[in-house]
């Protein structure tokens, strides 16, 4: 089995497409973890973000408006998580599980209420999806155009990752967020508002997670359906652990997972003549996630992550 240049170009392009939601969602998970709040509700926030974006885009025909309302909705669910964990001092893991149950339930309820009892939204028109970029950057070399031509979100995700890196590691606000994630009592003695910083980080986490889910109906599929996320939120959390809570490593981990999913889909092509079940190929990204975590080594979370803070 030999991959042609066109196959390799398609593999590269689809890797970026499938890695983009993971990169954005994992940056959201990183924001929350660095502030000392465990957030395993990424899956639920991605689901509600995908629904809101698909519904708003279908109704208004404006994908940017869909992304905006998805981010606002994710921010609201982040506020709910922060209220439970930061103010009410609930168990952070249990709160995240509740978000993972509540958000998809809300998505299905409102989907059926808006779209005449259907569990999926109407398809988004092709003209209303994210614009394609670099489609004819090198007309004389079609393989290059095939490799680089992609939805705008496939490249915007790297800008978002760079913005999160700069915020957390190069700005004064980021230093304060990381401080309350390591030792909130020490930060409080220096006058830091531990509650306020954690609220901000968790709400931003929700917005980014929802954006990660929102770009899926604007790129890979054209409508929302209940299983649209299919575990990608948990893969994003795994990427944060695999990347040892560092943005550059996390992006590389997401690219690896995106490559695995893209490779599995390309191998489904009948021209390769593989006598392998489609279902076995589809589990490759999830199997790689488990294998990678087994060989990651010790990954040190922020010292105060998951611990209740009581002044």
Image (tube, helix red, strand yellow):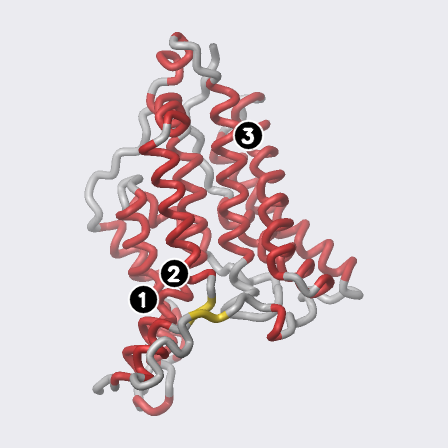
Q: Which residue is outermost to the top?
A: 189
Which corner quadrant holds the N terminus? Answer: bottom left
Tell me where residue 207 sits by quadrant: top right
Q: Tell me the residue at 19%/43% (across/down).
A: 297
Element type at marker 2? helix
> N-terminal of the two: label 3 or label 2?
2
Element type at mark 3: helix
Mark 3 vs mark 2: give the one in front: 2
Q: In this view, does 132 lie to the left or right of 147?
A: right
Residue under circle 2? 19
Mark 3 is surrounded, within 10 Å at the Cα level, by few (under 14), some (14 to 19) or many (20 or more) other residues, namely many
Query: Residue 174 falls in which quadrant of the image?
Result: top left
Marks 1 and 3: CB-CB under 8 Å?
no
Residue found at x 31% / y 25%: 303
Left or right, residue 114 beside residue 70? right
Q: Position of residue 112 (x, y in %)?
A: 75, 60
Q: Distance between the residues labelled 2 and 1?
A: 8 Å
Q: Position of residue 199 (x, y in %)?
A: 53, 28
Q: Is residue 131 left or right of residue 142?
A: right
Give the residue at mark 3. 82
Q: Where is residue 147 in the image (x, y as percent from the top left)?
A: 33, 75
Q: Mark 1 points at which residue?
A: 259
Q: Residue at x 66, y 62 (%)?
A: 62
Per the model, the C-alpha gap separating discs 1 and 3 is: 34 Å
Instruction: Give the total number of marks visible in the rendering.
Output: 3
């Amino acid at each position: 089995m030999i991959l042609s240049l066109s196959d390799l170009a398609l593999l590269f392009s689809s890797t970026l497409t499938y890695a983009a939601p993971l990169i954005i969602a994992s940056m959201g998970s990183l924001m929350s973890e660095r502030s000392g709040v465990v957030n395993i509700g990424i899956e639920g926030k991605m689901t509600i973000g995908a629904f809101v974006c698909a519904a708003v885009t279908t109704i208004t025909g404006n994908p940017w408006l869909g992304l905006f309302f998805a981010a606002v909705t994710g921010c609201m669910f982040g506020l709910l998580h922060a209220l439970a964990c930061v103010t009410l001092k609930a168990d952070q893991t249990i709160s995240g599980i509740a978000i993972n149950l509540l958000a998809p339930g809300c998505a299905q309820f409102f989907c059926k209420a808006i779209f005449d009892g259907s569990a999926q939204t109407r398809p988004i028109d092709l003209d209303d999806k994210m614009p394609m970029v670099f489609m004819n950057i090198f007309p004389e070399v079609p393989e290059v155009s095939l490799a680089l031509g992609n939805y705008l979100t496939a490249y915007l995700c790297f800008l978002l990752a760079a913005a999160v890196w700069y915020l957390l590691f190069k700005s004064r606000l980021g230093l304060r967020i990381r401080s309350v994630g390591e030792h909130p009592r020490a930060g409080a003695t220096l006058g830091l508002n531990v509650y306020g910083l954690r609220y901000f980080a968790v709400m931003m986490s929700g917005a980014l997670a929802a954006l990660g889910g929102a770009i899926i109906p604007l790129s890979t599929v054209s409508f929302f359906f209940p299983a649209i996320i299919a575990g990608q939120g948990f893969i994003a959390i795994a990427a944060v652990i695999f990347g040892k809570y560092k943005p550059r490593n996390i992006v590389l981990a997401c690219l690896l997972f995106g490559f695995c999913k893209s490779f599995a889909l390309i191998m489904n092509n009948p021209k390769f003549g593989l006598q392998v079940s489609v279902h076995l190929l589809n589990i490759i990204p999830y199997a790689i996630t488990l294998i990678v975590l087994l060989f990651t080594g010790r990954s040190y979370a922020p010292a105060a992550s998951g611990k209740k803070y009581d002044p």
